[in-house]
Image: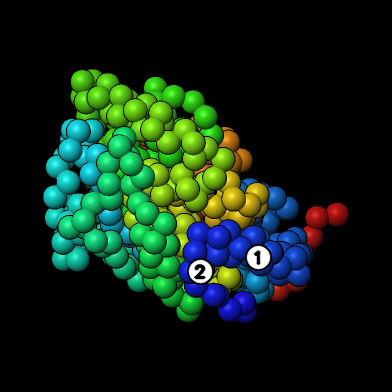
Amino acid sequence: MFSIKYPKTLSGIRELVKGMPGEDYEAQENARSHERLLTKPRGSLGQLEKIYEWLATWQKRYPAELNTIQILIFAGNHEVSKYGVSAYPSEVTQQMVNNFEIGGAAINQLSNLLNADLRVIPLKLDTPVKDFTLEPAMGDAECLEAFCSGMHAVDKNSDLICLGEMGISNTTAAAALAAILYGGNAKEWVGLGTGIDDNSLKRKQEIVDRGLKTHLNSIGDPLKLLCCFGGREFAAIAGALVAARYLNLPVMLDGFTCTVAAAVIEFLHTGALNHCMVSHCSAEMGHRKLLNLIKKDSLFDFKMRLGEASGAALGAMIVQAACRVHNGMATFDEAGVSKRE
């Protein structure tokens, strides 16, 4: 088990990402070898077999286990909400955090099904990150603080970490961050978010394009771009997935906003997301484009766009099924079933 040093500067984050540990090939091969002995035609469970192999590889043990699932929702507010880029006002972020805490949201029901440890971390909701059309959304110190909050939230005793977010207007920030990281204009990245009308969509596109022009000088530095456009929840997601890598914990990512936050880390170091799976392809239009760019497949496409780790929780259920099948099935010898010639 690697120890984690909390970064004190953005350069410290770069070093942390660069030094992330790799996979466990022995655990991977043990999973593959045992799969060949199970009472089924080889490869017949398709992606479930690959999911179990991934789980063992990044837990760095065989057999893999899935007894404790942690779901982390990071919540942040954005000053760009003042432009009417969401169907909801910014106070809904805090209201939904309250709803999570009393068990009334969709993620609460999914978490209960998983018997997961659900944690909601509000990040200075009374102080939204700044308007990215005028200045960087966060200073270096703000970004670093949120990144470390994400690291600190990860429970080392978990078997799988599910990451999600809550933040009114954060799909606007996500579209802008994706566009400046990977190229393109607002029309290629901006979607309907919480279900805005055509006028609001046009306004949202205008805000993103305005922000892209403001921060052209930061192109090429993903952490600076995270500061320019991202909210605290973006930085916290990035911190959590980096901490998980050091703690040998596989990660299940949620939808568009969550994947954009993760993409900052992949942009820093190719392969930095190998311990992460993307649960679903969001209905938010930029998500499929982003998945192609970072070479990630989603587990499913249910046309979801809720956020709050709802897709990640469903993804964890698939991982749970893969783990239960592999660990519970009999081998040909144990069951007295004839092997393939």
Furthest-right residue in this view:
341
Looking at the image, residue 81 lies above or below residue 166: above
Q: Nearer the viewer, residue 101 or 29?
A: 101
Residue 195 lies, in percent from the top left, at 23, 32
- Viewer-side label of 2, 1: 2
Residue 108 lies, in percent from the top left, at 26, 61
Q: Which residue is mark 2?
A: 7
- Residue 336 shown left or right of residue 269 in the figure: right
Q: Secondary structure at mark 1?
A: loop
Badge 2 local density, few (<14 within 10 Å), some, or many (20+)? some
Q: Would residue 291 be seen by someone viewing this image from the given angle?
A: yes
Residue 62 lies, in percent from the top left, at 66, 73
Looking at the image, residue 146 lies above or below residue 6: above
Residue 13 found in image quarter: bottom right
Q: Which residue is mark 1?
A: 19
Q: Nearer the viewer, residue 175 or 274?
A: 175
